[in-house]
Amino acid sequence: MPWRLLPTMPSICHPLMNPPPELDTAMEHTLPALPFAIDALAPHYSKETLEFHHGKHHNAYVVNLNNLQKGTDFESMTLEEIVRKSSGGIYNNSAQIWNHTFFWNCMKPAGGGEPSGALAAAINSKWGSYTAFKEAFVKSAVGNFGSGWTWLVKKPDGTVDIVNMGAAGTPLTTSDTALLTVDVWEHAYYIDYRNMRPKFVETFLDKLANWSFAEKNFS
Ligand code: FE2
């Protein structure tokens, strides 16, 4: 099943001061909690990196979106609807919220290794072996110029592919299904890896990747 971000709950209104809840469809977005303890990915992805990446960067997108959507039709939409229908600042911040929440789920303590089952078969069919896929994924992520995201996606025909996207790009706006992603904005790796993006992407695959999450997205 493709991963779905749970919609944010509608804001609660005081019955005497605000419209009744059934008339108030405004939705305040909140920063989703990490799916693991903040120090659980160390030493490959440190607590300090997550304090900044999740607590500062991801949170800033949430704050920005809540400010930007005030008084617009986007206030009553789910996050995924906003990503699909918006542009400019509202798109950038909503897509970055979705991408980061997806990215946290792409990592787990003692992750890495190789996928199994149908996803492994699809990867072998496309690249010949996991080793060849890994080489292609790292090469793609390292060559993703500037800030962006490198995705493993499922195409509408059921095959898999690697897609580079810049800035707040997300497969949510395409016909592809996101399976796994690595954030290649410098804020994702500079504290732990400095300028060594290749080392970060290799470590992401070898030690952090949550293949069971990708397998669920593929099924
Ligand atoms: Fe990021």
Image (cartoon, rainbow, N blue to C red):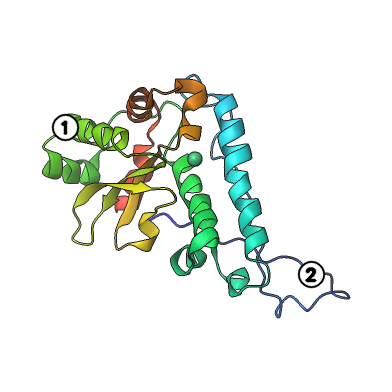
How many other residues sit within 10 Å of disc 2, few (<14), some (14-19) or many (≥20)? few
Disc 2 designates what residue?
Answer: 13
Q: Amino acid at mark 2?
A: Cys
Q: Which mark is residue 132?
A: 1
Give the Cα separation between the discs numbered 1 and 2: 54 Å
How many other residues sit within 10 Å of disc 1, few (<14), some (14-19) or many (≥20)? few
Q: Does the image show residue 169?
A: yes
Outermost residue on the right side: it is: 16
Q: Quadrant of the C terminus?
A: bottom left
In this view, 62 is above or below 208: below
x and y, in percent, of residue 189 in the image: 46, 29
Q: Could you say which is closer to the camera, residue 99 or residue 179?
A: 99
Q: Does the image show residue 32?
A: no
Q: Amino acid at mark 1?
A: Ala
Mark nearer the N terminus (1 vs 2): 2
x and y, in percent, of residue 118 in the image: 22, 47
Q: Is residue 94 left or right of residue 136?
A: right
